[in-house]
Amino acid sequence: MINPIGPVVPPGRMKQTRQPDIALSGGMHLRPWRESDAQVLVQSCIDPDIQHWNRPDRLTTDTAREKIARWKLRWQNEEAALWAIAPADDDVPVGLIGLADLDLRGGSGEFVYWLLPAGRGRGAMVNATLAVSQWAFDTLGLHRLRITHSVANTASCRVATQAGFRLEGTMRSALLHSDGWHDEHLHARIRDDTGPS
Ligand SMILES: CC(C)(COP(=O)(O)OP(=O)(O)OC[C@H]1O[C@@H](n2cnc3c(N)ncnc32)[C@H](O)[C@@H]1OP(=O)(O)O)[C@@H](O)C(=O)NCCC(=O)NCCS
């Protein structure tokens, strides 16, 4: 039987375009990860805050390179869109942002992000979240974007709220961290929401 409700985003729209560079205010930009950034990923996995909140696996330079290569494939397969956040001058990444769990048919995606200490404290993640949201709604055509984070992660909660992601509720005992199960906030922004842009 033919499904009368078509996909929100037609298949192929993402893979037919090159992943864009996106300028941010404050001298930063978003760009695709390169295999030469592998050492930054290795560093991210040993940063105590990223380790605690994002729970990445430990990486070597080789496995980090492989991960970056897989991210390129995930763009091609329309499964995820991940950018490096880097200062425009030296172009060495200080963070990661993107949408994982992309569901083009259903029109949604979930943010993943982190900053190394060198990138924190300047509002870079709020700017990056706004920029990726604009790309996701206006260029890709998604309908709903989510941010989830441990209720104990105040900085992430502030980023979500300042980027216009309304708090929709608390998911009980939703994610296992090194110190036990954490409740998680669910924030979301809908294409037609009014708010920061
Ligand atoms: C979460 C993260 C991206 C926020 O970026 P940041 O550059 O540190 O945040 P900013 O300095 O722009 O601050 C954003 C807000 O969070 C608050 N904040 C920042 N660090 C905080 C902390 N440790 N505790 C409480 N609030 C904090 C700031 O005061 C600011 O709120 P305000 O505008 O109301 O004053 C970054 O801290 C990070 O990557 N942390 C480690 C990993 C992580 O938490 N990943 C997210 C998993 S969901």
Image (cartoon, helix red, strand yellow):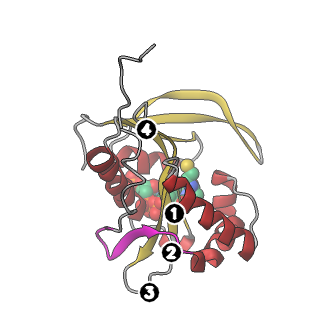
Q: CA distance from mark 2 to mark 1?
A: 8 Å
Label 4 vs 1, first from the N-terminus: 1
- Circle 4 SS class: loop
Task: Please give the residue where the numbered disc 4 appears in the rendered image.
Answer: 104
Q: Check residue 96 in the rendering and tell me which mark sits there, or answer none.
A: 1
Task: Please give the residue where the numbered disc 3 appears in the rendered image.
Answer: 90
Q: Is residue 3 visible?
A: yes
Task: Give the extent of the magenta segment.
Answer: 22-34
Q: Is residue 28 magenta?
A: yes
Label 3 vs 1, first from the N-terminus: 3
Q: Is residue 31 magenta?
A: yes
Q: Residue at x 42, y 69 (%)?
A: 31
Q: Residue at x 66, y 72 (%)?
A: 65
Tell which tag, 4 or 1, sits nearer the viewer: 4
Q: Please state which of residues 35 and 167 is positioned toward the viewer in this rendering.
A: 35
Q: CA distance from mark 4 to mark 2?
A: 28 Å
Q: Is residue 197 above or below residue 32?
A: above
Crowding around mark 2 (Cα neighbors within 10 Å: few <14, some 14 to 19, many 20+) is many
Task: Please give the residue where the numbered disc 2 appears in the rendered image.
Answer: 93
Contact between marks 4 and 1 (CB within 8 A): the answer is no
